[in-house]
Image (tube, grey):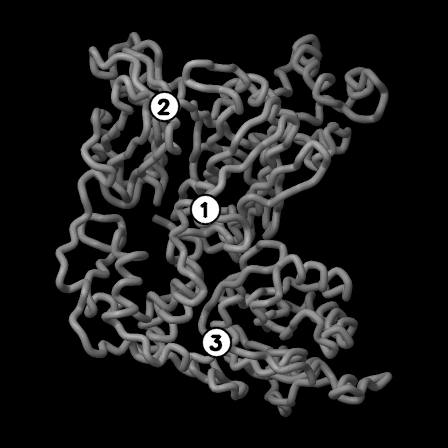
Amino acid sequence: MKTRRILATTAVAALVGVWGFAGTLTGQSGQAAAAGQKVDNFELTDQNLHAQNLYLLADAKAVVFITQANGDAAVRANAGAYNALKAAYKDKGVEFFMLNANPADTREAVLKEAADYHYDFQILQDTYQLVGEQMGLDRTAEVIVIDPKSWNIVFRGPVDDRVSGERTKATATKTYANDALDSLLAGRPITTARVAAPGARIALTAATQHDKVTYSKDIAPLIQAKCTGCHQPGSIGPMNLVNYDDIRGHAPMIREVIRTKRMPPFHADPRIGTFHNDKSLSADQIRMLVHWIEAGAPRGDGADPLGAQTFQAPEWPLGKPDVVLNIPAFTIPATGVVDYKAPWVAMPAGLGDRWLRASTVKVGQRQGLHHVLTHYLANVPTNGDPTKGGGGQGVSVGGYAVGSESSLMPADSGTLVPAGGAIGFQMHYTPFGREAVDDTKLGLYFYDKGKEPTYVMHNSVIMDTALRIPANDGAWQDTSYMTFPNDATLFSAFPHAHYRAVSTSLEIMYPDGKRQMLLALPHYDFNWQGAYVFEHPIDIPAGSKLVAHYTYDNSKRNPANPDPNRTVTWGEQSFEEMFFMSYAYQWKGETAAHRVNYDTALNASRGFGMIDKNLSGKIEVAELNGSQAALRPMFGMLDRNGDGGLDAAEFAGIAAARAGAGRASAAPQPEASNPARPQG
């Protein structure tokens, strides 16, 4: 499968040998690394919750990092000089960032510091200090210049000589950073490659704190807890990690994927919310594992706790299902584009009304099956062909996307699957170079009769089917929301988009205007998707907006971008794009014995939330773009109260107005607003 990040992070073993981490430990004793040191790839998140991968900047002429810490007098005094340096070179192909390696500086504090002192930079937060260790950071207010041709540090020092210790001169007489950049861009040797920085000391966590780490006591249990479940025979990992030899052989790659945050595959920012299904490593676990690898992955004494076990992924991870539905087999062609398939399978006779508690999709052909969506069909399709006609809008009974196979309901909660009928499937297949047959199955797990759950689970989707991403735009942002008509409880969220999506987040906007971030994925990974289950379910008061944000990279810097010169719109295939944030919730006061119908009003708010980009609660003329632009001439007529914007009630009249004008409705059509519809 084509990936966005893997292409940018070539295998470390091939570049530097099995243990050849050139310069990796330099600076861990507190001594700054000299110019000429190579910087291995890494990914860090900035104060605005966007991730930056160093090696994706390979086309830059230079990459500059300025070491920063909140409250640092030297950095504050140089703020104007830093902004001027960036302004002078940003149009010459130079990329600029600040680098904060102080774990005590929170994201909120960094945001305030940047605003108060006008830092015009992405401030990358090196919370685990792994980048700081490799670069040998010693002081703040240091400008570090990296040459992307070699990824070597070619200069480190102050921006100029204006600030020195506690003294500040009116004007600079030496322009160290400008001189270094001018020489690098001109291809000349940098005459002054190292000058002492004027800022405060940076306290790095020494690698020696992990000198006593042992494989048998520390590393093996960690690998088993966090990695072996996927990396064992019969599971989804591309290699096994079931003994010391496996782990040592893949150690350089493990270090690489940790530093670039590709693994473990849980991409929620740890500073935003807590999650029941968190697969990530703690800060100390990350440092311990990386330091152990950088020390040569020593075997040490003691038996191999992993080697003494036999590993084999279970056929069904949740145990034997109550019902297994065999989805009609499909032959995936070697090449081409495959339209979505809509097979169906009749529910077993005599099953009766049953409450679903969990489901698992057992994938037949992992390389070629992109996703599976499910929905209950009250009536078996009359065409009699189980490979066709499974389209519909019924309740979901689970699904699959890369990295997400099982769906579990919260305790004492379920979804009612009525007697009879069928399960319809939406199957998205992607050819991968050779013909293959997919024979995926769906396993259903029900509550025992007489032990039905108390609470009813619901699902819906925030989307923007009017999505339109300009060609060659590396940071296109979009927002959409839905408004809850009654009190509810939010349990989980499942972000989904395609190759061009690079980050996403979900927040709640309360009726009083207060906003709270619930989930942030600074690095959205198309190759690993799943639900994020809140450790503490979120109360949603009536009138609250659930707001989703996406950022897309439609530039040549995105290695997986099929065509950066194309304006991209919503579409089912992966080379098109989506804005799709599904979520699971319950209505307050609803029980299995006392059902309510608030979903209709909730889903009716979707179309309004697609257009109201500034979250004002009113649609303004400037927000009517794309297919909605045809409404501009009649805006005055639709704005009945003359306040310059369309509220929800006025927006509801759009369908009638457009129908009267002989045009298609501007409100989302059922096909676009149905949560069971395409999730490419």
Left or right: residue 453 compared with residue 116: left
Q: Nearer the viewer, residue 271 or 468?
A: 271
Residue 614 horizontal/vertical position (percent): 71, 37
Q: Are marks 2 and 3 in contact (CB under 8 Å)?
A: no
Residue 537 appears in the picture as rendered: yes
Residue placed at 21% from the left, 32% from the top? 439
Helix, strand or loop status at disc 2: loop
For label 2, the residue is 453
Residue depth check, mark 1 versus mark 3: number of the one nearer the observer: 1
Left or right: residue 450 compared with residue 671: left
Disc 2 versus disc 3: distance between alpha carbons? Answer: 55 Å
Q: Nearer the viewer, residue 336 or 588?
A: 588
Mark 1 surroundings: few (<14), some (14-19) or many (≥20) residues within 10 A: some
Give the quadrant of the C terminus.
top left
Q: Quadrant of residue 428?
A: top left
Considering only order in the chain, which callout, 3 or 2, is on the residue closer to the N terminus? 3
The numbered disc on residue 300 is none
Q: Quadrant of residue 227?
A: bottom left
